[in-house]
């Protein structure tokens, strides 16, 4: 029992480290945005982010035991996920260049709400009143942050919301892969399609800007490595324990983003974020709590069914 507790604690630490890496990636994107387009930065992030994706696959024991095959039946599903990530990144990166860092990050945490909303049409998963109420509560929080109709509202506030919807789609789609396909292999496929898609998108909307300095090149490499390493850390943490044990800690990213935005860009949009951010967090935690209860009930029912079958033998 102690060993399991220690493993969960380590998984939580790794997942929080992933949040820090994601936020550091966002800081670099915001820093580089005045000189490079969002499409360019997305392309660079996906290119250098392939390195941790390859490492994640190489370290995957299931893939190595299975003969190290690189073929998957659902490559079209991986392509759809990669394309969704391409456009999600484009919208999120544009918003990072136009909005306060903490505000963009906080709105992006509506991903959990979109994930719940997409669960029924894509997975045919029953979504009850509690989770729909949480979705409604979370979107009230988003509206309070965006303040449509006020002087502070602008169309680009919709960008992180659109990015969240596409990120949620990519997460839900990942649950449709065949059980025997290693997550790392599917993630690598998606990453390759995202890299190709982001480069084509960058070439179609603008030419690549010459990298101004070695300093900028270093930031670009770090951006990709931070993003790819964050994904790798999340893969590792989710393999160590159940997602429900980690999900509540994902909201640590909001105060982390606020502190980083304040330190590096002298932004402190606390009046814009409250109380909307609290409603988003509350809604997310309510969804997590409900999923934990449903998961626990399903495990209890499964154990009871197994006991009945064993009793008949």
Image (cartoon, grey):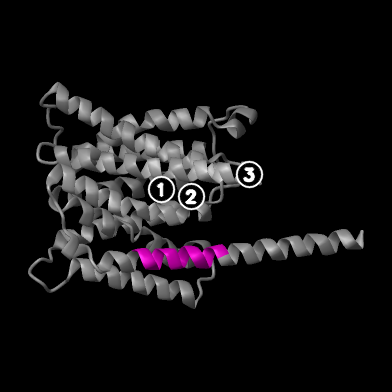
Q: Distance between the residues labelled 1 and 3?
A: 38 Å
Disc 2 marks which residue? 174
Where is residue 253? Give x, y as percent.
Answer: 33, 51
Quadrant of residue 144 within the rendered picture: bottom left
Q: Nearer the viewer, residue 138 or 274?
A: 274
Q: Is mark 2 on a helix, strand or loop?
A: helix
State if disc 1 and disc 2 touch (CB < 8 Å): yes
10 Å neighbourhood of mark 2: few (<14), some, or many (≥20)?
some
Q: What stretch is highlighted in magenta?
A: 281-292
- Residue 285 is one of the magenta-drawn residues: yes
Residue that label 1 marks:
81
Of pointers 2 and 1, the one earlier in the residue sequence: 1
Check residue 293 for magenta coloring. Answer: no
Q: Which of marks 3 and 2 is nearer the N terminus?
A: 3
**Residue furthest to the left:** 151
Observer-nearest of 305 and 46: 305
In space, the residues marked 2 and 1 are separated at their CA atoms by: 8 Å
Residue 223 in view of the camera: yes
Q: Which residue is drawn at 45% across and 42% down?
A: 13
């Amino acid at each position: 029992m102690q060993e399991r507790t220690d493993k969960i604690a380590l998984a939580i630490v790794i997942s929080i480290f992933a949040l820090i890496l994601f936020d550091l990636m966002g800081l670099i994107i915001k820093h580089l945005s005045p000189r490079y387009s969002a499409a360019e930065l997305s392309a660079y992030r996906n290119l250098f982010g392939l390195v941790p994706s390859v490492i994640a696959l190489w370290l995957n024991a299931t893939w190595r035991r299975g003969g190290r095959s690189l073929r998957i039946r659902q490559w079209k599903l991986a392509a759809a996920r990669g394309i969704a990530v391409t456009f999600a990144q484009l919208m999120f990166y544009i918003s990072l260049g136009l909005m306060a860092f903490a505000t963009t990050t906080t709105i992006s945490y509506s991903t959990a709400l979109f994930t719940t909303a997409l669960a029924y049409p894509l997975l045919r998963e029953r979504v009850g009143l509690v989770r729909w109420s949480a979705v409604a509560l979370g979107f009230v929080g988003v509206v309070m942050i965006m303040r449509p109709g006020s002087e502070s509202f602008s169309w680009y506030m919709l960008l992180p919301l659109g990015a969240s919807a596409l990120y949620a789609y990519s997460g839900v789609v990942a649950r449709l892969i065949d059980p025997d396909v290693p997550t790392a292999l599917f993630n690598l496929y998606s990453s390759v399609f995202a890299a190709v898609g982001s480069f084509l998108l960058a070439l179609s909307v603008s030419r690549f800007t010459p990298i101004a300095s070695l300093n900028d090149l270093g930031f670009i490499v770090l951006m990709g490595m931070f993003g790819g390493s964050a994904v790798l850390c999340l893969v590792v943490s989710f393999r160590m324990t159940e997602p429900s044990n980690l999900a509540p800690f994902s909201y640590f990213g909001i105060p982390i983003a606020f502190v980083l935005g304040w330190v590096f860009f002298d932004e402190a949009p606390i009046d814009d974020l409250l109380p909307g951010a609290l409603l988003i967090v509350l809604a997310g935690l309510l969804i997590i709590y409900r999923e934990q209860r449903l998961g626990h009930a399903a495990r209890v029912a499964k154990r009871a069914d197994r006991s009945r079958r064993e009793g008949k033998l």
